[in-house]
Image (cartoon, grey):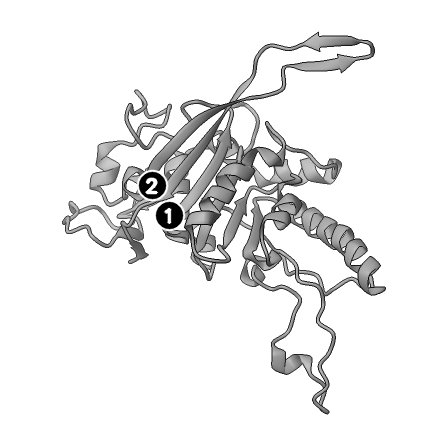
Amino acid sequence: MSGVPFGKVEYWDERFTRNESPFDWLLPPQALDRPILEAMGTLPTHPQIHHIGCGTSSVSLHLRKLVENPQQIHNTDFSKVAVEIGEKWERQVFNEAEGSKSGNGTTPKPINTSLSGSLADGTAPEAQRRQDDGVPHEQPPRRMCWSALDLLSLDQILLLPRRYDITIDKSTSDSISCAEDPTIVLPYPLRATDSKRAYPPLPPHFRSKVHPLHLLAVHLAYLTSPGGRWIALSYSGSRFPYWPPYPSSVDEGLLQQEIVDGGFVHPGRLWRLESQEMLQAPQSETDGDHVVHRPEIVNYLYVMTRTNVAIERT
């Protein structure tokens, strides 16, 4: 486990408050274009995209180039500060472009960054966009959706009102893997609907710890339509402990059988690993007139597909 407090929202709030500059982990956003476009080619028209851990990455604005409607994209982050920065950047960048076309660079109504308003987009229903005399109002520019979200909080996950087709994860799982193991109640309230298992009797509100990536996988599965994709870029070649060869210890991510027996669905039933690909990072940089050679750095691109095992709240 890292000594950096990646599991503390205060760490991220302070980091993004101190430095609002764009920052991309590992590789530039274009590194994810191919798997995203491949996924879009196999999914329904206008797929809903969930960009988790958006931070101050340029991925959010880059994603707008890949969709017809910005409202297909929902950017979420643990830190409300990061969400507010990203939402501000979107207004600035696209108001300038749209203002140059229409002569009107007016800032639209800001997106509500609270979870309960996560799908607010600053627009009104058609009936409300008309004056009493029936003349349509000019519609404000469409924007992506933005909200602060703790992906390990079941209460917050259950507030999200829609299902996603694609989840974009650019080193977010890396950060979450460094968090403390969360405590869950067993049997866990999200259950596989095809399970006929009678769980062993447990004391009321029996609690156990689970590796954060297992909880993340179950929560994302609840939010993802069958056949949906989870596209993750990681610095680790063994990031996801859901498929064999399993980790050798709980500290490394092994899911204990007694937790599964107690009513926690195994993420390996919810996600299927389609591919794992090594991506080489740039190996040299220019330092004045000299080329500085760096050690080879390899990142890993994972593509996972949501299975047909349904889970629901009990």
Q: Which of 294 and 182 is in front in this view?
A: 294
Residue 287 screen position, x and y as percent: 78, 12
Residue 114 screen position, x and y as percent: 59, 58
Residue 278 appearing in the image: yes
Side of 243 relative to 42 (left or right): left
Image point 17% across, 47% down: which residue? 199
Q: How far apart are marks 2 and 1 (CA)?
A: 7 Å
Q: Is residue 246 above or below residue 204?
A: above
Which residue is situated farthest in the bottom direction here?
133
Give whichever of discs 2 and 1 has the lower sequence position.
1
Asked if disc 2 and disc 1 are in contact, CB closer than 8 Å, the reply is yes
Give the tally of numbered discs. Answer: 2
- Crowding near pointer 2: few (<14 within 10 Å), some, many (20+)? many
Label 1 element class? helix
Identify the residue position indicated by label 1 in the image.
221
The picture quadrant where one finds residue 152 is top left
Residue 136 screen position, x and y as percent: 71, 81
Side of 195 relative to 264 (left or right): left
Residue 160 screen position, x and y as percent: 47, 58
Identify the residue position indicated by label 2 in the image.
271
Q: Is residue 172 above or below residue 94?
A: above
Which residue is situated farthest in the front direction here?
41
Residue 210 appearing in the image: no
Q: Which amino acid does label 1 sit on?
A: Ala
Q: What residue type is labelled 2?
A: Trp
Q: Is residue 17 above or below residue 228?
A: above
Q: Nearer the viewer, residue 162 or 78?
A: 162
Image point 33% across, 41% down: which residue? 271
Image point 81% across, 54% down: which residue? 96
